[in-house]
Amino acid sequence: MTTLGPLERLPASSSLEQILPILERDGGVIIENMFPRSQIEAIRTAADQHSRDFAPGSATQGLGEDGAAFVGANTIRFSSLGKLTPAYFQMLDNELYESIADAVLLPTCGSYWVNTAQVMYIGPGEPAQVLHRDGNNWWEFVSRTWPDSPEITLSAMIGLEDVTEELGATRVVPGSHRWGELSRFADADSVPAELGPGDALVYSGQVLHGGGANRTDDRWRRAMHLSFVAGWLTPEEANANDYTTVELAEQSPRVQRLLGHRSYDPRPHRGGGLWLKNVKAIEEN
Ligand SMILES: O=C(O)CCC(=O)C(=O)O
Ligand SMILES: [Fe+2]
């Protein structure tokens, strides 16, 4: 097996012309300081406090036995982050993440929405998560189109502190988004995506990755996940249910759309309008 090099790290001042070819080549790239410290601190403070309400192994998503193994017995996860702090809405409006997501996803959809936004605190002693592709949530589509599947989902793991390999940095198998066999994963060689607070590992829904083992005795790996999915696919979470129209009235049109409070307009592609009732209509998009 060849030894893989580390993932590339780019400053947040990088242009799309610098970022996209690396994302395309490796399936993931680390953008340093993508999110301002103030937003990260607000999320971490709220998440630290809220995490006390959750037992490890539970998650705010409805999950069966397989899901519980996927999440990990000593990992705390929860979502609905806009209920905890308005910093979440500011993160949704991050211009760099928006421009990357536009470039990656808009070729296959008129707009995309939040797939899930979760705090992911991996506990001491937690073994590594199984390597997987986030796009496999939409298995019926991916399995029929692989290896030529278009990008339908884009994810980011965001450091809420210094996330080292020892603490459980997300592991990535660079190049695996281009593998011919969709079910090959057991023999994969992975590299850790170490993050500072506000750094983001931005990765394709097609690349193999997974949470790293937390090899510390007493520290939690504090990171956050924020992913988008094409607007014609069902997200992991029913984000729209978290907020009323009134609660989102002051948010940007982008935030309203990302959280399911605007209809889906397929243009410039073909197809019908979707998600049409009781949210802002296509004409208002
Ligand atoms: O916790 C991590 O680092 C990654 C988690 C992940 O990839 C997932 O749950 O889909
Ligand atoms: Fe994942």
Image: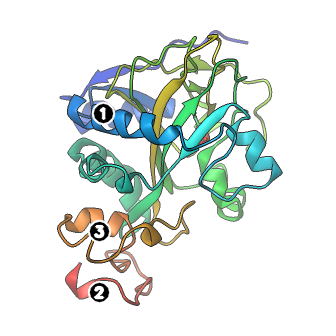
Q: Nearer the viewer, residue 223 or 154?
A: 223
Query: Which label belongs to residue 281?
Result: 2
Q: Residue at x 32, y 69 (%)?
A: 257
Q: Residue at x 21, y 64 (%)?
A: 251
Left or right: residue 285 versus residue 135 is left
Q: Residue at x 41, y 29 (%)?
A: 29
Q: CA distance from mark 2 to mark 1?
A: 33 Å
Label 1 residue SS: helix
Q: Position of residue 24 (x, y in %)?
A: 44, 37
For badge 2, the amino acid type reads Ala
Question: Is residue 34 something that shows in the picture?
Answer: yes
Mark nearer the viewer, 3 or 1? 1
Sequence-wise first label, 3 or 1:
1
Q: CA distance from mark 3 to mark 1?
A: 21 Å
Mark nearer the viewer, 2 or 3? 3
Query: Which residue is denoted by mark 1 in the rendering?
Result: 40
Left or right: residue 235 versus residue 47 is right
For badge 3, the amino acid type reads Gln
Which of the image's four quarters has the C terminus? Answer: bottom left
Q: Residues within 10 Å of mark 2 (few under 14, many from 20)?
A: some
Query: Which residue is denoted by mark 3 in the rendering?
Result: 256
Q: Residues within 10 Å of mark 3 (few under 14, many from 20)?
A: many
